[in-house]
Image (cartoon, rainbow, N blue to C red):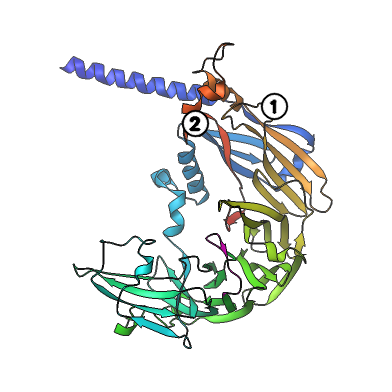
C-alpha cells in the first residue's frame, strides 16, 4: 500500500512537471514583438500601453513602455487573463485578483440612476377594478391568471429620476421636467392579485414601444451628477414629439439622499412623491427638434454632453456648477439624423482628457433588422488650453485604442488579412501609429509581429484538403460553433493606456 502511494505521488509530480514543461515551452516559443515600419519609435514614449492577447487555452499580458515591449505568459484562457489584467489595473493583489470578474464589478459599488414615471398632476385618469389584460401576451407573470386587481390609465405622464448607491442606504427621486403624451399611446399602471395571495405590479414606462428614457449618473468629487436622457429610437419605432418639456443636469450629495418613505395605500400603482435634495445646475429643452444624446464625466472637474439643437449637433463641456466652458459645433445639417453616440474617454490627469467618439443613425429594413450607419467620428483633446478637435483620420473600424495628448494621436487598429480568403478564419494584423493631430501626418507606424498565423494549421488540420476532397467550407460546417473558432485562434483582445483612467460610455 505504501509503495502504491509513493508511485501515485511520483506520477502526479511527473504529470505536473510535464504540464509545466509544456507551458514553459509554449511561453518560450511564442513570437510577439513590435516591428517598426516607418517614423521614429520615440513618439510612442508619450503613450505607454498594455494589453491582452491569447486564445481559449493560453494568453499573455504585454506592456509597451519607452519603446520596449515586454510580455508575461499565463496558462489561462483569454477571459481569465482579461479578468487578471483588469484586476491588476485596479490594484488588486494576492489571491483576490484571480477571483476578480471584471464584468460584475460595476454593480458592486458606485452610484446609479434609472427612470420611471407617474401620471401628471393634470392628467386624465381612467380607473378599472381589474388587471390590464391587454398586456398578458407580452409579459411574463407568475401564474396563469389573476383573480383580481386594478388599473389606472393616464393620457399624460411625468418622468422621474431614481438615484441610489450599492454601498449606502440613501436614495433620491426627482421629477425631471419631461412629460410623455401621445394620443395613440396607453400609459397604464396595473396590479394583479393571484389566488395564493401574491401580487404583481407593472406599468407601461419603457415598454410597449413607448419612448425610452435612460438615466445617467457620474460621481465627481463629493457629489453625484445625474440626468434623464430620452432616446430617439425605441424598440424599432421612431416616435416624434412624445417626449416634451426639458431635462436638467442635477447635483446631489450622499448626505442629501434619504431612506424612501413608505407608500400610502393609494400610491401602490404609482408614486408622485419626490425625495432627496437635488440641485438643478442647467436645463435643456426636449422636443422633436431638441434633445440630449449622451452625457459623461470628463476628467475630475467637468462633464461632456452631446446634444441636438434643431438641425445642429453640438458637443459641450460643463463645469461642476453647470456653466458651459467649451462648445464645438460638429455639423449644422446632420444633427437630426444622429440616434446614438459612443464615446471612449481617457483622463491622463485631472485636467488632460482624450475623447474619441462615434455617432450613428439607426436604420431598420423591411424585416425590422437594425442597421447602424456611421455618420461622424472624431476625437477631442481637452486640457488647460481648452477644447480642441483633432484632425480626422482613416476609417472608424477595427480600433482597439484611439487616444490623443499634446496634439498627438495614438491609434491601435486591427486590419483584416485580405491575402488569406479562408472560411471561418478571423485573422488580422494589429498596427500601432502616432499621428500629428493638426495635420494628420503619420509620425510613426509599426506592427505587432506574432506567430498567430500558425493557428491556421490547427484550424484546417482535421480536414481533407486533397484535390478530390469536398470544398473546405462545406466540410467545416459542423465546425462553425460559437466560441470554438475563437478558442483556437489567438488574437489581441484588449489594449489600454497604462497611465490613463478609461471610461467607455458605451462601445459596440
Q: Is residue 372 magenta?
A: no
**Disc number for residue 419:** 1
Which is more foreground, mark 2 or mark 1? 2
Q: Position of residue 150 (x, y in %)?
A: 31, 77
From the viewer's perspective, is residue 266 above or below residue 110?
Answer: below
Write down the quadrant of residue 354 in the picture: bottom right
Q: Name the foreground residue: 113 vs 214.
A: 214
Main secondary structure of the magenta stretch = loop
Does residue 348 appear in this view?
A: yes
Mark 2 or mark 1, earlier in chain: 1
Residue appearing at x 49%, y 73% in the figure: 185
Which residue is rendered at x = 54% and y = 21% of the image? 460
Residue 121: image location, x then y, percent: 46, 87
x, y percent for residue 153: 41, 79
Q: CA distance from mark 2 to mark 1?
A: 21 Å
Classify mark 1: residues with Cα within 10 Å, few (<14), some (14-19) or many (20+).
few
- In the rendered image, residue 239 lying in the magenta stretch gets the answer yes
- Tell me the residue at 64%/40% (across/down): 64
Q: Residues within 10 Å of mark 2 (few under 14, many from 20)?
A: few
Which circle marks residue 480 in the picture?
2
Which range of residues does the magenta coloring cover?
234-242
How far from the left and from the top, in percent, is residue 467?
A: 59, 11
Q: Residue at 55% across / 78% down in the picture? A: 178
State yes or no: discs 2 and 1 in contact (Cβ < 8 Å): no
Amino acid at each position: 500500500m505504501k509503495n502504491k502511494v509513493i508511485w501515485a505521488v511520483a506520477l502526479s509530480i511527473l504529470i505536473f512537471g510535464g504540464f509545466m514543461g509544456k507551458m514553459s515551452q509554449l511561453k518560450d516559443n511564442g513570437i510577439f514583438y513590435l516591428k517598426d515600419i516607418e517614423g521614429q519609435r520615440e513618439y510612442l514614449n508619450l503613450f505607454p500601453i498594455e494589453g491582452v492577447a491569447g486564445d481559449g487555452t493560453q494568453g499573455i499580458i504585454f506592456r509597451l513602455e519607452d519603446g520596449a515591449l515586454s510580455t508575461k505568459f499565463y496558462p489561462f484562457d483569454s477571459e481569465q487573463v482579461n479578468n487578471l489584467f483588469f484586476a491588476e489595473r485596479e490594484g488588486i493583489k494576492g489571491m483576490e485578483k484571480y477571483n476578480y470578474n471584471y464584468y460584475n464589478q460595476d454593480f458592486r459599488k458606485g452610484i446609479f440612476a434609472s427612470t420611471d414615471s407617474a401620471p401628471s398632476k393634470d392628467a386624465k385618469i381612467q380607473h378599472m377594478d381589474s388587471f390590464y389584460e391587454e398586456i398578458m401576451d407580452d409579459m411574463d407573470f407568475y401564474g396563469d391568471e389573476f383573480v383580481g386587481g386594478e388599473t389606472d390609465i393616464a393620457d399624460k405622464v411625468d418622468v422621474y429620476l431614481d438615484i441610489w448607491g450599492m454601498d449606502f442606504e440613501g436614495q433620491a427621486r426627482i421629477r425631471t421636467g419631461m412629460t410623455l403624451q401621445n394620443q395613440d399611446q396607453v400609459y397604464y399602471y396595473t396590479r394583479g392579485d393571484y389566488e395564493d395571495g401574491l401580487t404583481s405590479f407593472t406599468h407601461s414606462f419603457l415598454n410597449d414601444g413607448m419612448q425610452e428614457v435612460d438615466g445617467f449618473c457620474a460621481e465627481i468629487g463629493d457629489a453625484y451628477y445625474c440626468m434623464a436622457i430620452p432616446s430617439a429610437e425605441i424598440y424599432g419605432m421612431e416616435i416624434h414629439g412624445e417626449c416634451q418639456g426639458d431635462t436638467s443636469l442635477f447635483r446631489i450629495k450622499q448626505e442629501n439622499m434619504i431612506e424612501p418613505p413608505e407608500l400610502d395605500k393609494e400610491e401602490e400603482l404609482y408614486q408622485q412623491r419626490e425625495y432627496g435634495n437635488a440641485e438643478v445646475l442647467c436645463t435643456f429643452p426636449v422636443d422633436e427638434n431638441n434633445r440630449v444624446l449622451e452625457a459623461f464625466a470628463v476628467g475630475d472637474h467637468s462633464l461632456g454632453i452631446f446634444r441636438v439643437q434643431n438641425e445642429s449637433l453640438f458637443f459641450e463641456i460643463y463645469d461642476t456648477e453647470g456653466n458651459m466652458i467649451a462648445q464645438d459645433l460638429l455639423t449644422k445639417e446632420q444633427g437630426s439624423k444622429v440616434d446614438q453616440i459612443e464615446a471612449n474617454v481617457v483622463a491622463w490627469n485631472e485636467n488632460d482628457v482624450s475623447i474619441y467618439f462615434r455617432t450613428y443613425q439607426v436604420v431598420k429594413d423591411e424585416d425590422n433588422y437594425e442597421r447602424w450607419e456611421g455618420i461622424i467620428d472624431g476625437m477631442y483633446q481637452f486640457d488647460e488650453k481648452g477644447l480642441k478637435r483633432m484632425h480626422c483620420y482613416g476609417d472608424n473600424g477595427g480600433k482597439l485604442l484611439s487616444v490623443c495628448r499634446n496634439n498627438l494621436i495614438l491609434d491601435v487598429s486591427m486590419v483584416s488579412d485580405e491575402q488569406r480568403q479562408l472560411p471561418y478564419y478571423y485573422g488580422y494584423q494589429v498596427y500601432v501609429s502616432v499621428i500629428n493631430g493638426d495635420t494628420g501626418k503619420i509620425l510613426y507606424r509599426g506592427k505587432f509581429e506574432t506567430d498567430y498565423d500558425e493557428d491556421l494549421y490547427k484550424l484546417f488540420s482535421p480536414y481533407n484538403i486533397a484535390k478530390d476532397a469536398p470544398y473546405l467550407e462545406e466540410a467545416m460546417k459542423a465546425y462553425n460553433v460559437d466560441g470554438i473558432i475563437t478558442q483556437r485562434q489567438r488574437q489581441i483582445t484588449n489594449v489600454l493606456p497604462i497611465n490613463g483612467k478609461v471610461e467607455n460610455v458605451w462601445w459596440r
